[in-house]
Amino acid sequence: MVRIFNIIHKNGEIICDYAPETSDSIGHIVVDDTSLEVKDVKYSEYEYGKKMYVSHVRAKLAELLTSKAQIPKEICAVWY
């Protein structure tokens, strides 16, 4: 699970912070809202060496953008 928060959609980008699992270690990601590609990322220290959480964050942001629904300020991505 990863908590995605401080979600902002503006100027052709969707930007957010994220915290993996129950960690207080925060990462930050910027995704292009057209290509859905990651433009910038600061990995959380929790995921050092794993880098799997950021891919779930990018996928959830892409899902929000393609759904055309209102972008929430906070959401979780869960997988198993």
Image (cartoon, rainbow, N blue to C red):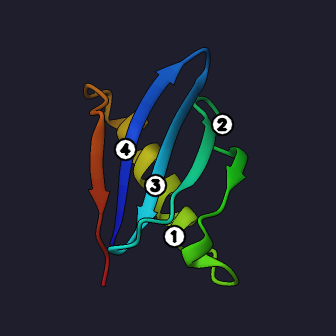
In this view, the residue farthest toward the front is 24
**Residue 26 circle label:** none
Closer mark to the observer between disc 2 and disc 1:
1
Seen at 41% across and 35% down, the residue is 7
**Does the CB distance between marks 4 and 3 fall below 8 Å?**
yes
Look at the picture and state if 55 lies above or below 52.
above
Q: Secondary structure at mark 2?
A: loop
* Between 39 and 27, the one nearer to me in the picture: 27
Q: Which residue is mark 3?
A: 18
Seen at 37% across and 44% down, the residue is 5
Q: Which residue is mark 2?
A: 35
Q: Position of residue 68 (x, y in %)?
A: 32, 27
**Residue 5 circle label:** 4
Give the amino acid at mark 1.
Answer: Tyr
Q: Earlier in the sequence, mark 4 or mark 3?
A: 4
**Does the CB distance between marks 3 and 1 fall below 8 Å?**
yes
**Residue 53 circle label:** 1
Q: Position of residue 17 (x, y in %)?
A: 49, 47
Q: Earlier in the sequence, mark 2 or mark 1?
A: 2
Q: Residues within 10 Å of mark 1 (few under 14, many from 20)?
A: many
Q: Residues within 10 Å of mark 3 (few under 14, many from 20)?
A: many
Closer mark to the observer between disc 1 and disc 4:
4
